[in-house]
Image (tube, rainbow, N blue to C red):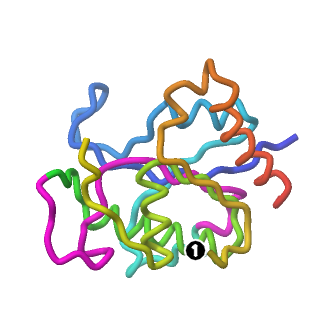
Amino acid sequence: MTRPLIAVPARFSATTSALRYAAEVNARALIEPVWRAGGEPAGIHPADPAETDVAERLARFDGVLLPGGGDLAPHRYGAADTHAAVYDVDDLQDAFDLEVARRALDLGIPLLAICRGLQTVNVALGGTLEQDMGAPGAQGWFTAVQWHPEDTADRDPAQQALFDALVGEARERR
């Protein structure tokens, strides 16, 4: 049986140990649970949505995993000021991830959103965020969590079940 193809937007990295240049990466901790669940994870390049049709790019995928990462720029959800705790803002990453969230929901593509991914979906649907917590009309399947299940999915069946559910729904869509 062919594995359902799961799109995972890549993250920008200034350095990586195996490359001499800045890179686009996905964490093994995210990719391996998708693989264990029977999916085929595929990193996708975060291109400017003004220059590419994100819906067309996602159409060939059976599911989407929207990973964590840095903070969304506060202006994306209507905030006038930026709290000092906001970190690793990247406008291109924000624009791409927001469009991926919108198009996946519009197309009914199964979507698992993790941490920043949940925040991205919230903003894509018109919501706002609290910048610091002090240390929907979607057609398809959608689950979001505000923690990192990939951290323990290799040994915690409850965490792995999130990835299993994404791949299962993607298989059904196929």
**Residue at figure coordinates x 80%, y 46% from the top left:** 168
Q: Is residue 56 above or below residue 33?
A: below
Q: Is residue 83 magenta?
A: yes
**Residue at figure coordinates x 25%, y 41% from the top left:** 135
> On the rendered image, what quadrant is the C terminus found in?
bottom right
Q: Position of residue 172 (x, y in %)?
A: 85, 55
The one nearer the camera, 151 or 6, is 151
The one nearer the camera, 80 or 52, is 80
The type of residue carrying mark 1 is Arg
Q: Is residue 47 magenta?
A: no
Q: Is residue 80 above or below residue 141?
A: below
Residue most extreme to the front: 134
Residue highlighted by disc 1:
103
> On the rendered image, what quadrant is the N terminus found in?
top right
The magenta stretch spans which residues? 58-84
**Residue at figure coordinates x 22%, y 33% from the top left:** 20
Q: Position of residue 8 (x, y in %)?
A: 53, 50
Magenta-drawn stretch, dominant element (helix, strand or loop): loop
| Secondary structure type for disc 1 | helix
Residue most extreme to the top: 155
- Left or right, 156 with reference to 12: right
